[in-house]
Image (cartoon, rainbow, N blue to C red):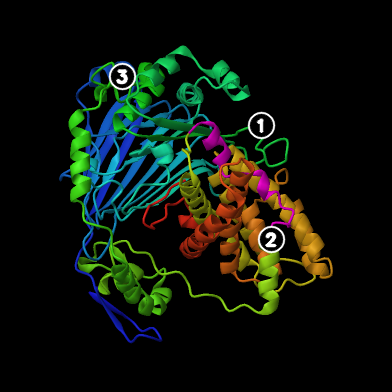
Amino acid sequence: PPRWCCVSPPSPPKVLLTTYMAARRGLGRITAACEAGVTRLTRVAHRAPCRLLPMADGAAAAAGAGAAHCAIGGYGGGLLGGDVVELEVEVEAGAALLLTTQASTKVYRTKRDGIAATQSLNATVDDGGLLVLAPDPVVPYESAAYEQRQRFMLSPAASLVAVDWVGAGRVSRGERWAFSHFASRNEVLRRPEAGAAPAKAVAVDAMRLSGGAGLLGLDLGRVEYDTVVSVLCSGEEAAPVAERLRMLSSALAHRRVGQRPGVLRAALAEEVSEPAAAAARALLGNVVVGVGVAQGSAAPKGGGGSGGGAGAGALDVVIARLAAEHAEDVFRLLHFAMAPLAPRLGASPYSLRIHADVAALCPIKAGAAAAAAAAAPPPPTTEAARATSSLAAPLAPALSIARGLSIRAPGGNGWVPVQRAISAAAGLPPGEEAPPPPPLALSPRQRARMAHLSDATLPTGGFAHSGGLEAASQLGLLGGGDEAVRRFTRAATHSTATLLAPFAAGACSLFSSPVGKEGPSPAQWREWEALDTALHAQLSANGPARRASAEQGRALSRVGAVWLRQEAAARDLCAAFGDRGANPNRAPHGATMLGALCALLGLPPQVAAEVIAYTTARDVLSAAVRLNLVGPLAAVEMQADVAEEAAAAAAVAAQRGVANAASSVAKRGAATHR
């Protein structure tokens, strides 16, 4: 295969791409089958850098409980840039499999080519089977890049508990969130019946973090959270784990509310159990837990977009998100939550990570961290930032042409994205994204329509949703002062915009051609409904965001029908959108409806993405003013600052496409996260 590739953009002249790092492709295959009530590993195969280790320690206890235990490891100290690990896991009917890791998964810095280390896991679980994925955290080092995709195909009577978590890095060395980028996507799918349509995701948990100097936006209330965790639970055997996670969420929220009177404290007190309260008291630092339920039915009863009761054959998925100040607390909480699995597995997951009844902070950590922070190099100067921009700007045409293309690495051991190779050839930092598209040239009519679509007088119900600001304030997570509001707004706006922008831009592109009197073609309807269904899967575990999105989608369909009443085809189409969501009992979501409306108004997809960013910042800051957290004049300056940054991030996210849509983190002095 060729070792180079030439791309000829209009300007500058040819860019020669040279790749000098071949990816190592590791494979792993595991099959667990139930024989006479005992689970046996009937297939274990691996190839470096992946290694599978059937565990001997505790094997007797696991076998006695009818389960099997296997650890995922490697032949080196961690993953290097360009490493590819692909895992295939099959749990047959009645089998129980516990998958762990030897230790934390360390990801070393990328080489100059910026190629990320990637891992993928495809798991199938048959009826009566149980898969428990309980790894230690992924720890990306400074300038590391890591991407992960995990797909779980579940039969109706299967059970799953999956943990996915990332640490801040080598904090004691001053490398807190200093990696280049981290992306993780978890999908839970219902196995289709024979002859049925292909499987669709019931729930999606996706996160994209960009590291850098400063603190993450989840560092609310002057607390530094050094680990982020997602836990996915589905099935009968996972129900006790999900219930314990709910109990922990209530216990931690009750502790934060403290002695303040009110309905919130009284409601939380009724949900707190003594075991959960005891687990909360044993924690070393601050922990925040949020739990949501994704309804797995394709046609939920009781419309309104609220995700009512699930119909027959539904596959409900409980998704819990944790942010913790110390990894030790995560081990304790996961051990408490997964304790009900011990009779089935022979031991409780993470039991070997708990070494004392109560944890205490080592005094050396604070001193070492302070020394490392003092010795850390200063952030890039303005001149350095301009130098990077001067490198990226001339390459914009080449990066645009190369988007989505790949070339084979030397030796044929993997594919290198051409876009990333161009950036590497120009000396851009590893993991650097393509620059945002150039500003649009809009006609006066288009500018007027864009302004009207973003105006606060448009009755879309956006002001009824605070983006989590009100809850953060009630639970004491926000901290005080205008700067705390600014950081929260930046985090919430950036995360929401980068998640929703690909869907809005995709819907706008779908209807960019004029629609005739007969309306959209059946293929267009199917593609739009697929977009709306995919967005519903990503929002399904976040109840407030899901309901707000559905309400805004319904309102936008009514607004469009009135706004375009002089254009019969467009007016009727807006009404049809409101009546024909991806589900007959559910309204369309706001982002997909906004994209379609932008197309009917003659606006390009980039406008749809930017409107998402602007209105999100506007709605969060409106809630801040209403809650008396910030003054109206200060909110004006904050909105100008946050919305401009989020619009640029939304434009880049829209280019990545729906397949890579995820709640994200900004890279601007202080990184942010939802």
Q: Which residues are magenta?
A: 456-476
Total marks placed: 3
Identify the disc placed on residue 309: 1
The disc labelled 2 sits on which kind of residue?
Asp
Give the mark toward the camera: 3 or 2: 2
Residue at the outermost left position = 76
Residue 457 belongs to magenta span:
yes
Residue 471 vs residue 295, the one in the foreground: 471
The disc labelled 1 sits on which kind of residue?
Gly
Residue 258, image x, y percentages: 49, 22
Give the mark toward the camera: 2 or 1: 2
- The residue that mark 2 highlights is 455
Instruction: Name the N-terminal-most of marks 1 and 3.
Output: 1
Residue 434, image x, y percentages: 39, 68
Residue 446 belongs to magenta span:
no
Under circle 3, the secondary element is loop
CA separation, marks 1 and 3?
34 Å
